[in-house]
């Protein structure tokens, strides 16, 4: 047995949580790798909502879906994930975030603590019981540590009877490798 790499672990969590016909969210579409992965899992009766603030990312994601003939399974939105509730009204089985910047693109356009936390809050409301949110946290870039710390602070304070919060991280790797935070909703959260 080999310990799962971080990205494999994240994908396995999503695959376990998503059934055909599910509604799911890719909160950071980027080059569309996760959107495509989710589109394969939800089947023809499911729906992926993919968000990115950059046109370049939206275009790359649409192209990746078109290449596989799966564009009908995803709605790719050029908007921030903090606005998820404007678009998604159905219960969500799973959501994924890859925090940081779009590889091969402008390193100044990064996910930010406030908008990331707002999106998590909104998704927790939309999530089904047993649904999951998977965050892959890249924190080596400028601004990454602030976001990492803010997200960890926020998720660590979620009430444990309502949300199970897990961290999966290799502790002795060099150069700020990414790690996973996973949230599983186990009971409706109290209205705020
Ligand atoms: C690490 S990349 C995502 C990589 C992607 N999952 C893939 O498969 O290529 C992070 C992405 O988040 C996007 N982003 C930044 N702020 C955002 C926001 N408020 N809402 C949605 N996407 C955002 C960036 O434009 C960037 O494309």
Image: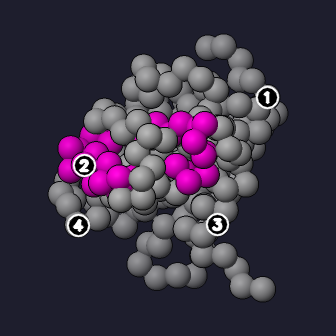
Residue at (27, 40) in percent of width and height = 53
Secondary structure beneath dot 3 equals: helix
Mark 2: few/some/many CA within 10 Å (<14, 14-19, 20+)? some
Residue at (32, 42) in percent of width and height = 52
Q: Which residue is mark 4?
A: 104
Residue at (79, 28) in percent of width and height = 187
Select label 3 or label 2 by which is in front: 2
Label 3, label 2: how far apart the Cα atoms are: 27 Å
CB within 8 Å, label 1 to label 3: no
Residue 57 located left or right of residue 35:
left
Q: Which residue is mark 1?
A: 187
Q: Position of residue 157 (x, y in %)?
A: 65, 37
Select label 1 or label 2 by which is in front: 2
Label 4, label 3: how far apart the Cα atoms are: 24 Å
Q: Position of residue 175 (x, y in %)?
A: 41, 78
Q: Which residue is mark 3?
A: 9
Mark 4: few/some/many CA within 10 Å (<14, 14-19, 20+)? few
Label 1, label 3: how far apart the Cα atoms are: 24 Å
Q: Foreground: 118 or 66?
A: 66
Secondary structure beneath dot 1 equals: loop
Q: Tell me the magenta residue range.
A: 38-66
């Amino acid at each position: 047995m080999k310990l799962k790499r971080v990205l494999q672990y994240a994908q396995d969590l999503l695959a376990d949580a998503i059934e055909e016909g599910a509604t799911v969210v890719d909160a950071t579409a980027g080059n569309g790798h996760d959107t495509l992965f989710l589109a394969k899992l939800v089947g023809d009766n499911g729906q992926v909502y993919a968000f990115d603030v950059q046109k370049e990312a939206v275009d790359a994601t649409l192209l990746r879906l078109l290449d596989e003939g799966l564009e009908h399974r995803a709605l790719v939105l050029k908007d921030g994930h903090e606005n998820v509730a404007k678009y998604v009204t159905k219960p969500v089985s799973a959501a994924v975030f890859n925090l940081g910047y779009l590889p091969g693109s402008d390193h100044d356009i990064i996910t930010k603590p406030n908008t990331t936390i707002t999106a998590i809050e909104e998704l927790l409301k939309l999530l089904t019981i047993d649904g999951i949110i998977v965050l892959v946290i890249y924190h080596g870039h400028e601004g990454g540590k602030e976001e990492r710390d803010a997200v960890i602070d926020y998720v660590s304070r979620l009430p444990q009877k309502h949300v199970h919060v897990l961290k999966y991280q290799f502790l002795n790797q060099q150069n700020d490798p990414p790690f996973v935070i996973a949230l599983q909703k186990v009971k409706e959260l109290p209205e705020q």
